[in-house]
Amino acid sequence: MRKLINHAKSLQGKLTIPGDKSISHRSVMFGSIAEGETRITGFLRADDCLNTIKVMRQLGIQIHDNGDEIIVEGRGMNGLRPSKEILDVGNSGTTIRLLSGLLAGQSFTSVIAGDNSLNKRPMQRVIAPLEQMGAKISGDKDSEFPPLTIEPINELHAIEYEMPVASAQVKSAIILAGLQAEGETVVIEKEQSRNHTEEMLQQFGGSLQIDDKVIRIKGGQTLRGQRIEVPGDISSAAFFLAAGLIVPNSEILLENVGMNETRSGIIDVIKAMGGDITIDMRENRISADITVRTSQLKATTIGGSIIPRLIDELPVIALLATQAEGITVIKDAEELKVKETNRIQAVASQLNHMQANIIETEDGLIVHGGTPLAGATVDSFGDHRIGMMLQVAALLVKEDVFLKEAECVNISYPTFFDEVLNLTGTAG
Ligand code: S3P
């Protein structure tokens, strides 16, 4: 249990946002199956991505960290080696799902497991398409949950697959398997989800065809090691964007925030809510320096195709909505139920403990705005994004706020609490 930083009179200053989690995972995985060396700067050294490094090492890849760069000595598509030990990916859904695609076509057995939260997350969504491609994968409880056992096969074959859920993890698993399959694999997305796998595949010299929501990828391609610069994670920046908007007398500059179009839905929402936000794109056209200032926000409705573009930001957007004028409706977001915890339930129950007025629905939340928040003991349920959202909420509260399982922030943002303290001007 941790006593959170509360009652901030103002947040002032700047901070550099740590590396993008999704891109960090992929940089190490693609680096491993490429030929030659990959050098990665800006890699996110947080538990989830360190687990990806750990399991790729178990699979025979040499990976070094010289403090500046992560260096991956790629061994090509057929260079992975069996691990004697279980591949324990901890809390990381991205690692288990992408790795399933990567290991589905290998000629050895692998077992992938995770922590208590991960072991409750649905895996049929990756197992079903991979089995159609000829993979042999079984999980716990009718193959719904990890641990997953992936057995050796001769070769995968291409499929055409219409995805029933909008999920970049599922899409990526199929693309990674498609790279090893005979023929051309076609993936049809339900809604466009984050496209880091498609971008990175091309960066590593691979090719795929993208036509709106239809992706085609040929098997048997050779990838080559690259230099990768990981931009800051907009999903981590989101907590400070929100804090700067709702804590009085604040102005925060967030440096190097990744601005990929498939991820930047929160910026659209902040603008729709009337937030004071300035975006200065960097020369690389990939990231931006963003300034936010305290704003009187108004309610909005969030649903449809924007949802995958801000799925991880919805907990902190719900917090913003508690401080806006009017009623905000979040819909089409049933995927929130199968994240690190059930985020619909977690957001509503924990913010309501702090005197918010939020109603859970089947596919989202109805948030009544203009509610002052109050002290409470709240629970992150071990979910990093719930924990960080609750710390931002605590900044508005006069009374003490205590957070259970606060150490979960290490999953994606180990320096999070230090950064909050620095901005309050009371550090050291
Ligand atoms: C991710 C995809 C999203 C997101 C997760 C990271 C990725 O999950 O919520 O934090 O890196 O591909 P889904 O694919 O389940 O939507």
Image: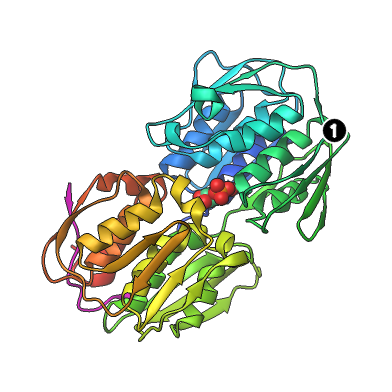
Disc 1 secondary structure class? loop
What is the count of numbered marks? 1
Amino acid carrying mark 1 in the image: Gly
- Would you identify the image quadrant in which residue 155 lies? top right
Disc 1 marks which residue?
220
Q: Is residue 348 magenta?
A: no
* Viewer-proximal residue among 97 and 131: 131
- Left or right of residue 251, residue 310 in this image: right
Residue lying at the far top of the rendered structure: 84
- Left or right of residue 86, residue 351 in this image: left
Q: Is residue 8 magenta?
A: yes
- Image quarter where the C terminus lies is bottom left
- Left or right of residue 302, residue 316 in this image: left
* Viewer-proximal residue among 71 and 22: 22
Chief SS of the magenta region: loop
Residue lying at the far left of the rendered structure: 399
| Coordinates of residue 167 in the picture (x, y in percent) | 61, 49
Q: Is residue 309 visible?
A: yes
- Left or right of residue 23, residue 324 in this image: left
| Coordinates of residue 126 in the picture (x, y in percent) | 63, 36
| Coordinates of residue 220 in the picture (x, y in percent) | 85, 33
Q: What stretch is highlighted in magenta?
A: 1-13
Residue lying at the far right of the rendered structure: 183
